[in-house]
């Protein structure tokens, strides 16, 4: 039975399964109320899921802001290209414009990574 539980934990590498396997193995070694132990694990897992849901709700605004801020420069550049193409053409034809495009691309990637890290919380 212990080998089967270990195989289960290896096949399904999820924290919840590891909690279950540890609890059942400890209960087998020490004895006691398995129903109470499993009830406590179920309560713990429900609380953990509530915390994950709460974190997702609290970070939703930040995630949406990150998406909007990431999309804003390309959308603005496309709109400007449609309205006044000669303004954007300088970025592609002038050496200084190319440097500005490269710098802005690097800064955009760094900014997106930073926003992604700020809104990614592990529970």
Image (cartoon, helix red, strand yellow):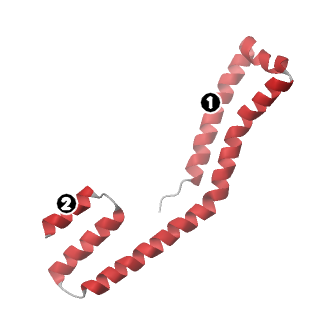
Residue 105: horizontal and vertical position, in percent? 65, 29
- Where the N terminus falls, by quadrant? bottom left
Q: Secondary structure at mark 1?
A: helix
Residue 108: horizontal and vertical position, in percent? 65, 35
Foreground tag (2 vs 1): 2
What's the residue at 60%, 35% (across, down)? Answer: 109
> Where 59 sits versus 68, above or below?
below
- Res. 50 in view: yes
Q: Earlier in the sequence, mark 2 or mark 1?
A: 2
Q: CA distance from mark 2 to mark 1?
A: 46 Å
**Residue that mark 2 sits on:** 7
Task: Say left or right for 26 vs 120.
Answer: left
Labelled disc at residue 51: none
Residue 2: horizontal and vertical position, in percent? 14, 69
Q: From this viewpoint, which residue is outermost toward the front?
A: 82
Location of residue 94 (image quadrant): top right
**Residue that mark 1 sits on:** 106
The local crowd at label 1, few if under 14, some if 14 to 19, many if 20 or more residues have their Cα within 10 Å, is few
What's the residue at 51%, 65% (across, down)? Answer: 52
> Where 79 sits versus 56, above or below?
above
| Depth check, front residue: 102 or 31 | 31
Residue 28: horizontal and vertical position, in percent? 17, 79
């Amino acid at each position: 039975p212990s080998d089967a539980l270990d195989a289960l934990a290896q096949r399904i590498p999820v924290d919840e399964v590891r909690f279950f396997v540890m609890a059942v193995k400890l209960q087998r070694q020490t004895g006691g109320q398995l129903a109470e132990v499993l009830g406590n694990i179920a309560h713990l897992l429900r609380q953990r899921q509530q915390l994950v849901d709460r974190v997702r709700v609290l970070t939703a605004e930040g995630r949406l802001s990150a998406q909007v801020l990431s999309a804003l420069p390309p959308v603005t550049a496309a709109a400007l290209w449609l309205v006044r193409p000669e303004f954007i053409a300088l970025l592609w034809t002038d050496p200084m414009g190319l440097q500005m495009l490269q710098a802005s691309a690097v800064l955009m990637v760094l900014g997106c990574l930073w926003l992604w890290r700020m809104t990614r919380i592990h529970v």
